[in-house]
Image (cartoon, grey):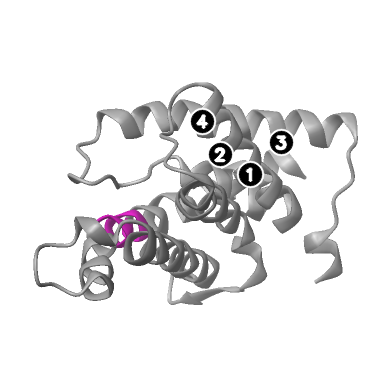
Amino acid sequence: MKKILKVDFTVKSMCQLAMFMAITLILSYVNEIIPSLPQGGTISVDVIAIMLCGYLMGAGYGVICGIGVSILQFVLGLATYYGPWSVLLDYVLPLAVCGLTPLMKTQKIGNLPICWGIVFVMFLKYLSHFASGAFLFASYAPEGMNPIVYSLGYNIIYVAPTLILCMIVVPLLYPRLKRAFM
């Protein structure tokens, strides 16, 4: 566990981290062409790079990648500022937790890898978006509907497909990239 969270800022690790941040930002532009829900939220292709950073470099680097990308998204105009709590719950925290993927073991069932780390981080990402929707954007809930119930349903609409996408793409890319990071 200690090795997974350890971060050493060597020239090599900083270059690799910068590469993952750049890939994540490029994929953020892909997110922009995917239709989003009326009050925000879309299938997030960009989190794939953060998850791979976590798996290949360790959770510490993955978290740094997620936080760095969230800052860069604001600098590049890819994110919308609704206040400090929204920045934390809609951008920084959901992207940072995506780097925690290696904290849970991947299990093989037959030849099919089940990445429990992806399930875990997507659940944390969902909780963050849920909290934002339920408490910061409660006024967007339809008249007479409980904001908590509305946020539970609203956020699962885009988090669940993102989970499925990540469960397919990350296990396909990881073994190919792992050789380059040895």
Mark 2 residue element: helix
- State yes or no: discs 2 and 4 in contact (Cβ < 8 Å): yes
**49 lies left or right of 133:** right
Residue 108 as seen in the image, left or right of residue 146: right
Q: Quadrant of the N terminus?
A: bottom right
Q: CA distance from mark 2 to mark 3?
A: 14 Å
* Residue type pointed to by label 2: Ser
Horizontal placement of 133 versus 149: left or right? right
User: Distance from label 1 to label 4 (Cα)?
Assistant: 10 Å
Separation (CA) of disc 2 from disc 4: 5 Å
**Which of pointers 2 and 3 lies earlier in the amino acid sequence?**
3
Relative to 56, say whether 112 is above or below: below
| Residue under the image location 73 percent in, 33 percent down | 16
Report, in whole angstroms, how far the alpha carbon at label 3 lies from the one at label 1: 12 Å
Q: Note whether 93 is above or below 134 in the view shown.
A: above
Dot 2 and dot 1 residues touching (CB under 8 Å): yes
Judged from the image, the secondary structure of the residue bearing numbered disc 1 is: helix
**Which numbered circle lies on residue 67?**
1
Q: Position of residue 128 (x, y in %)?
A: 46, 63
Q: Residue furthest top?
A: 76
Q: Nearer the viewer, residue 69 or 48?
A: 69
Q: Is residue 113 visible?
A: no
Q: Look at mark 2 in the image and give the residue it sits on.
A: 70
Mark in front: 3 vs 4: 4
Type of the residue with mark 3: Leu
In terms of secondary structure, where does tag 3 sit?
helix
Which residue is at 49% across, 67% downward? 124
| Residue under numbered circle 4 | 73
Nearest the viewer among 162 and 40 is 40
- The stretch in magenta equals 158-164
Q: Are marks 2 and 3 in contact (CB under 8 Å)?
A: no
